[in-house]
């Protein structure tokens, strides 16, 4: 019941931290209480979600940076005119 709803990755990482002695509230002499285990696993689940979110944002930023195209002023002006013409055509349909 204490770890109900947790992920396998959170459970695995939490137990690994307990075994390595990285959990301050657990002295390592006995098996951790269910409350300590639940707190450690919940912490690991939150940490993993945040890490995945951060990694996804970094990947998105990297992909966006790779897709940036620098235009010379002449091409930029030509494309701006094309967009204005397209906008005018779209407005005529409504």
Image: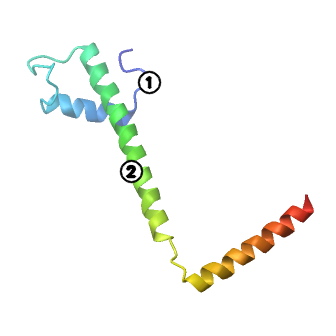
| Distance of label 2 from label 1 (alpha carbons) | 23 Å
At a point 18% along the width and 28% down the height, the residue shown is 18
First in sequence: mark 2 vs mark 1: 1
Colour scheme of the picture: rainbow
Q: Quadrant of residue 93?
A: bottom right
Where 83 sits versus 37, above or below? below
Q: Which mark is residue 78?
A: none
On screen, residue 94 above or below 44: below
Residue 53 percent coordinates (x, y)? 42, 44
Determine which residue is flagged by label 2.
55
Q: Secondary structure at mark 2?
A: helix
With 16 as the anchor, is 8 left or right in this view? right
Q: x and y percent of residue 31 in the render? A: 17, 18
Q: Residue at x 36, y 21 (%)?
A: 3
Q: Residues within 10 Å of mark 1 (few under 14, many from 20)?
A: few
In the image, taking residue 77 as reference, residue 39 lies left or right, namely left
Q: Residue at x 51, y 70 (%)?
A: 67
> Residue 62: where, in percent of width, then height?
42, 62
Foreground pick, 8 / 56? 56
- Residue that badge 1 annotates: 5
Mark 1 falls on what kind of element? loop
Residue at image position (31%, 28%) is 43
Task: Residue at the far bottom: name it.
Answer: 74
* 94 to the left or right of 32: right
Q: Nearer the viewer, residue 70 or 55?
A: 70
Q: Are marks 2 and 1 in contact (CB under 8 Å)?
A: no
Give the percent coordinates (x, y) of residue 8.
37, 34
Quadrant, the C terminus: bottom right
Give whichever of 64, 42 is nearer the camera. 64
- How packed mark 2 is, by other alpha carbons closer than 10 Å (few <14, some 14-19, many 20 or more), is few
């Amino acid at each position: 019941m204490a770890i109900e709803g947790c992920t396998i990755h959170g459970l695995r990482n939490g137990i690994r931290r307990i075994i390595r002695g990285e959990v301050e509230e657990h002295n390592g002499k006995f098996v951790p209480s269910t409350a300590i285990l639940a707190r450690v696993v919940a912490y690991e689940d939150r940490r993993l979600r945040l890490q995945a979110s951060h990694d996804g944002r970094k990947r998105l930023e990297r992909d966006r940076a790779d897709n940036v195209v620098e235009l010379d002023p002449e091409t930029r002006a030509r494309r701006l005119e094309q967009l204005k013409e397209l906008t005018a055509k779209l407005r005529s349909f409504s």
